[in-house]
Image (tube, rainbow, N blue to C red):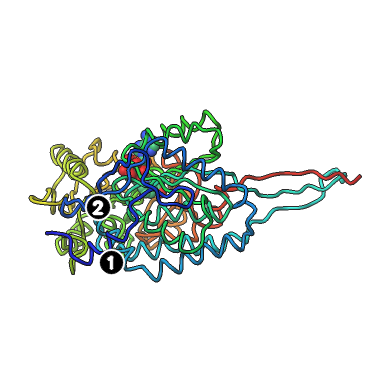
């Protein structure tokens, strides 16, 4: 399969350079990197490949623009975000197609991400004018205490490949609303959506230097000098836990503010008093959205033994009806994985579980031929100790274990170093309330399989990260608190 003419036309209009100080530039040595379609393995386009010197030039631009942007009225900052939101709505079909092309998710899901990702621009356009402080007498009655908020300063934002739009807007939105200037480094696998978004910001009238974007095949080499530069004040990263830990160590040298949105290993707990149809709907969404490549993807299905077989059977029936293919094709419900490495890793996890005694109910194999496809899969009776229960699968595999009582369900659910999200299915309100308290995660879906919302604080505990994105909390990641004392005389 080749790229269709309307796809080629869209790709030809995507900026293929670095965006530094308000200019699209080729970068040092005019090096390029290729971007591929994971459904065909074919090259889509070549774009600029930034060097470490280009990265530092982007930081120079962000530093140069910082004072003026911080002094720009919040209403003006908010209106630029709002205009970018409006432009994105006008061009939503292009944004969705671009995401499907470079990342592989089915078009309907890409449209969903335009909605979700766009909401961060709208939400933070509204939050820009609600940055407030406190004022009051000190307890001694000798003066007034003033607490105010200031932008933290120039930020470095590193995003992953799995949600090319939303992971960018979830950081750029609050940073710009707070009055911070930024350097953004998207993932080399899916940089085109960020370049497209940058074009919208430019069209919306964002002043030069406020947003700088560097695409590179050498993430660490480009990032190291930026993080080591004392002018940088904040690092916000979304990606895997091992990379996040390494970056936190680097950030420690300059005591940088950090936000870390890291990996997950979400438990999906189904009690014997659950509505099984609801649980199956939730499972389909929590597992197969984004081809299983979401930090919030249900990773371990922990199901009461009385309903385990019925749950697995109903789920397997839905999985058998899924249509695998290129996300642009009519009726496709599950696309490719991001690359062949991801396919191999998914296969190894399934094989390990089966070798240890798990039962393969449906799927379990990579597809032959072009593209990085892995069948949607269900395995039951997964033995404890299997890699699939410990590692983030990041693929379309449901792995089911059984439990017999609530205490065991809680123990199994919390038996991980991750703590991003959990899903619980029960028709008992009291049990649901107990689970809210008992599960050690930053977020929880009660009888629902997708819960992300720009108006809610997204983030994890334990090794799933630090900080929150979205909600009223999101903007505080980019603000620092200043206390001033004004004596009465
Ligand atoms: P990754 O850690 O490999 O890469 C993330 C980003 O960091 C990319 O831009 C990459 O180029 C860059 N990077 C990698 N090594 C680097 C280094 N040494 N220095 C600087 N930058 C570096 O992760 P990924 O494969 O792109 O994304 C998948 C991971 O992201 C999963 O673990 C997933 O759970 C996690 N994720 C978390 C959230 C969340 O909000 N918690 C959201 C989406 C994805």
Question: As drawn, which residue projects farthest toward the bottom?
Answer: 90
- Nearer to us in this view, 103 or 460: 103
At 26% from the left and 57% from the top, the residue drawn is 288
Quadrant holding the C terminus = top right
Q: Is residue 267 left or right of residue 372?
A: right
- Nearer to us in this view, 39 or 27: 27
Q: Is residue 467 left or right of residue 339?
A: right
Residue 238 horizontal/vertical position (percent) = 41, 45
Compared to 159, does 284 lie above or below? below
> Which quarter of the figure has residue 166?
bottom left
Residue 147 horizontal/vertical position (percent) = 72, 48
Residue 108 is marked as: 1
At 11% from the left and 51% from the top, the residue drawn is 370
Q: Nearer the viewer, mark 2 or mark 1?
A: 2
For marks 2 and 1, give the CA distance: 23 Å
At 72% from the left and 53% from the top, the residue drawn is 134
- Whether residue 417 appears in this view of the structure is no
* Neighbours of disc 1 within 10 Å: few (<14), some (14-19), many (20+): some
Q: Earlier in the sequence, mark 2 or mark 1?
A: 2
Element carrying mark 2: strand
Residue 45 is marked as: 2
Quadrant holding the N terminus = bottom left
- Whether residue 351 appears in this view of the structure is yes
Q: Is residue 165 left or right of residue 391?
A: right
Residue 423 horizontal/vertical position (percent) = 37, 54
Residue 156 is marked as: none
- Nearer to us in this view, 428 or 333: 333
């Amino acid at each position: 399969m080749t790229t269709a003419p309307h796809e080629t036309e869209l790709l030809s209009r995507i900026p293929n350079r670095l965006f530094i100080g308000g200019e699209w530039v080729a970068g040092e040595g005019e090096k390029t990197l290729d971007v591929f379609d994971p459904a065909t393995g074919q090259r889509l386009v070549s774009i600029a490949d930034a060097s470490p010197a280009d990265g530092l030039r982007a930081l120079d631009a962000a530093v140069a623009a910082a004072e003026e942007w911080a002094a720009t009225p919040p209403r003006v900052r908010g209106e630029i975000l709002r205009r970018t939101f409006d432009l994105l709505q006008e061009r939503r079909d292009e944004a969705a197609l671009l995401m499907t092309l470079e990342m592989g998710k089915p078009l309907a899901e890409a449209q969903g991400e335009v909605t979700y990702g766009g909401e961060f621009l709208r939400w933070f356009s509204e939050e820009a004018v609600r940055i407030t402080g406190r004022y009051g007498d000190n307890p001694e009655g000798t003066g007034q205490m003033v607490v105010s908020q200031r932008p933290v300063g120039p930020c470095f934002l590193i995003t992953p490949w799995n949600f090319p739009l939303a992971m960018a807007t979830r950081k750029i939105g609050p940073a710009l609303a707070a009055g911070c200037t930024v350097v953004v480094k998207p993932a080399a696998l899916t940089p085109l959506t960020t370049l497209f978004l940058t074009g919208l910001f430019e069209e919306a009238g964002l002043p030069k230097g406020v947003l700088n974007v560097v695409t590179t095949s050498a993430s660490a080499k480009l990032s190291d000098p930026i993080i080591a530069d004392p002018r940088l004040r904040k690092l916000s990263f979304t990606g895997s836990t091992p990379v996040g830990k390494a970056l936190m160590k680097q950030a420690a040298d300059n005591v940088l503010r950090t936000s870390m949105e890291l990996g997950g290993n979400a438990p999906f707990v189904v009690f014997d008093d659950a509505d099984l149809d609801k649980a199956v709907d939730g499972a389909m969404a929590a597992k197969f959205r984004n081809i299983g490549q979401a930090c919030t993807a249900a990773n371990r299905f922990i199901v009461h033994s009385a309903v385990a077989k019925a749950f697995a059977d109903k789920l397997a029936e839905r999985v058998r009806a899924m249509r695998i293919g290129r996300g642009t094709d009519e009726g496709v419900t599950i696309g490719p994985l991001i690359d062949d490495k991801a396919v191999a890793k998914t296969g190894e996890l399934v094989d390990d579980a089966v070798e240890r005694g798990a039962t393969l109910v449906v799927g379990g194999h990579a597809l032959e031929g072009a593209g990085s496809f892995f069948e949607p899969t269900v395995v039951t009776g997964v033995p404890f100790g299997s890699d699939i229960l410990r590692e983030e699968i990041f693929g379309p595999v449901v792995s089911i274990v059984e439990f017999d009582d609530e205490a065991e369900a809680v123990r199994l659910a919390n038996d991980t170093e991750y703590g991003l999200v959990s899903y619980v299915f029960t028709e008992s309100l009291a049990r649901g309330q107990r689970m809210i308290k008992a599960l050690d995660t930053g977020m929880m879906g009660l009888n629902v399989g997708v819960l992300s919302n720009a108006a809610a604080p997204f983030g994890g505990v334990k090794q799933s990260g630090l900080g929150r994105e979205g909600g009223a909390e999101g903007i505080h990641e980019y603000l620092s608190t200043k206390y001033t004392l004004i004596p009465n005389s």
